[in-house]
Structure formats: structure tokens, C-alpha cells
Amino acid sequence: MKQLIHAALLVCLVSFSAVRATAAPESFKVSDLTFKRPAGWEWVETTSKMRAAQLKVTDAKTKQSGDVIFFYFGAGGGGGVKANVDRWFGQFEEPREKINAKTEEATVGKTKVTYVTAEGTYKSGQPGGPFTPMKDHMLLGAIVEANEGSIFIRLTAPKDLGKASTADFKKMIETALK
């Protein structure tokens, strides 16, 4: 009887591990691109139908965390690059000239990517709804003008964590485009 119970427990443990492993993929698709999740970044079930994928990055020392959210609306959806850049900069309490707002265009392979950074008091919350001011935060964004429509990727985190995550963020995007 003990052996049967042990075997049943082992089956449950293996099953739980398999379910957990499928819940946290190492790579995932958004539109026609496959992104590889950076080591240490957690897979998060999306909290909105508008989100194509969601990750969480955590600083091991401070335990501060940030969100990485992928949006995809199909060909022609989601607005143009300028409208999204302006909207992202508008998600800060401070005016644009005070948030160290920057945009940088790059071409990876044949795909145009617009990177966006800003720092200040980030207004966290749903568009049009109430927001929570997050002091000393950073937004790192990318608009990938992919074949099947643009993919919008936004990392928001405490400023130090955002800066420390920049290389992994860019590598994740650029690897998907090669």
C-alpha cells in the first residue's frame, strides 16, 4: 500500500512539474516572431485580452520588479509609431522635457525597430482609468514594425532595474528578428 501511495505522489509531482514547465515557456510567439525569454525573467499569464504576452523581471538584491508587456493588434492596428511614442511619454507626470525622453531607430535584418526610453514618475494603470504614480521609474519601449503588423513591447520598472534590464530587453527583440 505504501508503495502505491508513493507511486501516486510521484505521478502527481511529475504532472505538476510538467504543468509548471508548460506555464513558463522559454520562447513564445507574438504575431510571426518568436521571442526567447531572458534568463531570470518570469512568464506571467496575461491580465488583459489586449496583451499578447507578459513577463516579469525582478532584481535579486532589492526584490523590486518590473513588467514587460507585449501588445499586438494585427496589421494596421494599434496606431502608428509616433502616436504610440507620444502616448508612452504622456504616461509620466512630468512634461516630456523633464523625463529624459529619447527615441532611437534601428534596423535589425530588414525590420525597423523604434526604441523609446523615459524616466520619472510613471502613471501606472489602465488607459482612461485611475493611475498610481510610481516615482523614479523608467519606461523602455520598442515598436517592432513586423510583416504582419507592429508589435509594441513595453518594460516599466524602477529606474535602476530598468537600466540593468536594457541589454536583455534589446537582445530579446533583436534575436527574434534574426
Image (tube, rainbow, N blue to C red):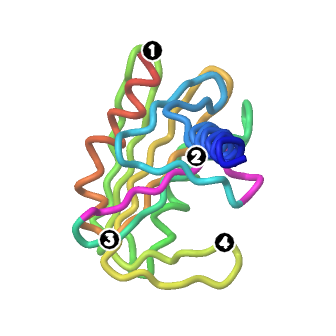
Check disc 2 and report its element: helix, strand or loop.
strand
Q: Nearer the viewer, mark 1 or mark 2?
A: 2
Check disc 1 and report its element: helix, strand or loop.
loop
Q: Say if mark 1 contacts mark 2, CB within 8 Å.
A: no
For disc 4, the marked residue is: 126
Say whether disc 1 or disc 3 marks the residue closer to the N-terminus.
3
The image shows residue 102, relative to residue 95, as above or below, that is above
Q: Nearer the viewer, mark 4 or mark 3?
A: 3
Amino acid type, mark 3: Lys
User: Residue 98: x percent and y percent?
Assistant: 29, 75
Q: Is residue 55 magenta?
A: yes
In the image, is 26 to the left or to the right of 79?
left
Assess disc 2: are there few (<14), some (14-19) or many (≥20) residues with their C-alpha within 10 Å of its C-alpha.
many
Check disc 3 and report its element: helix, strand or loop.
loop
Name the chief secondary structure element in magenta. strand
Amino acid type, mark 4: Gln
For disc 3, the marked residue is: 63
The label on residue 110 is 1
In the image, is 45 to the left or to the right of 177?
right
Q: Which residue is nearer to you in this view: 48 or 1? A: 1
Q: Which residue is nearer to you in this view: 122 or 100? A: 122
Amino acid type, mark 2: Phe
Say whether disc 3 or disc 2 marks the residue closer to the N-terminus.
3
Is residue 58 visible in the rendered image? The answer is: yes
Q: Which residue is nearer to you in this view: 121 or 176? A: 176
For disc 2, the marked residue is: 70
Q: Nearer the viewer, mark 1 or mark 3?
A: 3
**Region of the chain picked out in magenta, as a range:** 48-60
